[in-house]
Amino acid sequence: MSDRFLPRWLVATFAAIFMTAVLSVAAWAVELPYFAFSAGPVGDALDAIEVASDRLEVYPPKGELFFLTVSLQEVNVYEALAAGVDPAVDLVPVSLIRGPDESDEDFRRRGLEAMDTSKENAIAVALDRLDLGSEIESGGVEVVELLEGAPAAAVLQPDDIIHAVDGEQVVLADDLREALADRSPGERVTLTVERDGEVFDVEVELFASEDHPGRALIGILARTVDVRFPIEIETGNIGGPSAGMMYSLAIIDLLTPGDLTRGHVVAGTGTIDRSGKVGPIGGVRQKAVAAEAAGAEYMLVPSDNFEEAQTAPVEDLVLVPVSTIDDALAFFDTLP
């Protein structure tokens, strides 16, 4: 009778192999709540700029200005283990990157919208530095939505167009933030508003930001109407705001006699706001790896990311911390 059956140890071995195979397949199929950050494509910021106005003279530079990206990939168990031993890859919780109910399409759209705002700021900052701000035209700033609890809801309506704050013209939506930079919640400002073809002034009490209680807001979601720039930036399907600083520098380089980079290859990353402040970004370690692989000699890094950037596995790349667009311009003056 016993000859008809396999030995128990052999059955147990087969069962263990089978269960291991099943678990291995399951581990491959199950995605973990992490993104793997790895070095992404490197782009030429100068090639992305197109000067659309005959009034602006272009001076083609000899150096190169690279903007940097990261690749995001959802990972399974094996991919997470591989990322854990790769010094050039970081695992980042998905919850830090996207909302809990955000679809792939919403996530992509949010990135593209952030890029659009970044391009507006990049162009405006560059033209301001070149005293060419008057080249930007728009139909004003439209009120898209009023935030709940904002005093402005008593005097503003969706579709209102804001043309000025305390008599100072606003051209871009981010000009509102700049106009309120030195104000405090509870202060009052006068807005010049257009509604149904009529232009009038209203007084608005400023609202405290929920995320930053000391920051004063009007309490609206706004967008720029009919903006007309003398410069266009071609970004394709790249999303996010982190190339803003490099686009500003590329515009300044193109519209200024001489060569900003003095023939060097310079990469960089950092958001830029309407005042020219350079803000932090994600994936700075991976961007440093990409910069060195692309042949960059220097990499401009937001000051808030500088400490993290220094842990990147690079050898010859010189990291340069910057807090504003003026810091970046000052660095170029030091190049041989």
Image (cartoon, rainbow, N blue to C red):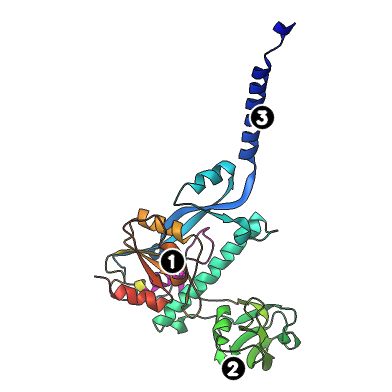
Location of the N terminus by quadrant is top right
Provide residue 4's location: percent of width, then percent of height.
72, 7
CA gap, disc 1 and disc 2: 40 Å
For the record, the magenta segment spans 231-252
Task: Name above or below for residue 119 compared with residue 27.
Answer: below
Report the residue marked by disc 3. 19
Residue 199 lies, with reference to residue 227, above or below; the image says below
Q: Please report whichever mark, 1 or 3, sits nearer to the chain's N-terminal start.
A: 3
Give the residue type at disc 1: Glu
Which residue bears the numbered disc 2? 166
* Whole-number angstrom distance, CA of label 1 to CA of label 3: 46 Å
Tell me if mark 2 has few (under 14), some (14-19) or many (20+) residues whose alpha carbon lies within 10 angstroms of its own.
few
Residue 45 in magenta?
A: no
Label 3: state its secondary structure.
helix
Name the residue nearer the viewer: 306 or 55.
Answer: 306
Q: Can residue 18 be seen in this view?
A: yes
Residue at 47% x, 58% y: name it.
Answer: 69
Q: Residue at x 63, y 30 (%)?
A: 21
Instruction: Please give the name of the residue rendered at 35% of the width and 72% of the height, measured from the top-left corner.
Output: 253
Q: Which of marks 3 and 2 is nearer the N terminus?
A: 3
What residue sits right under mark 1 in the picture?
307
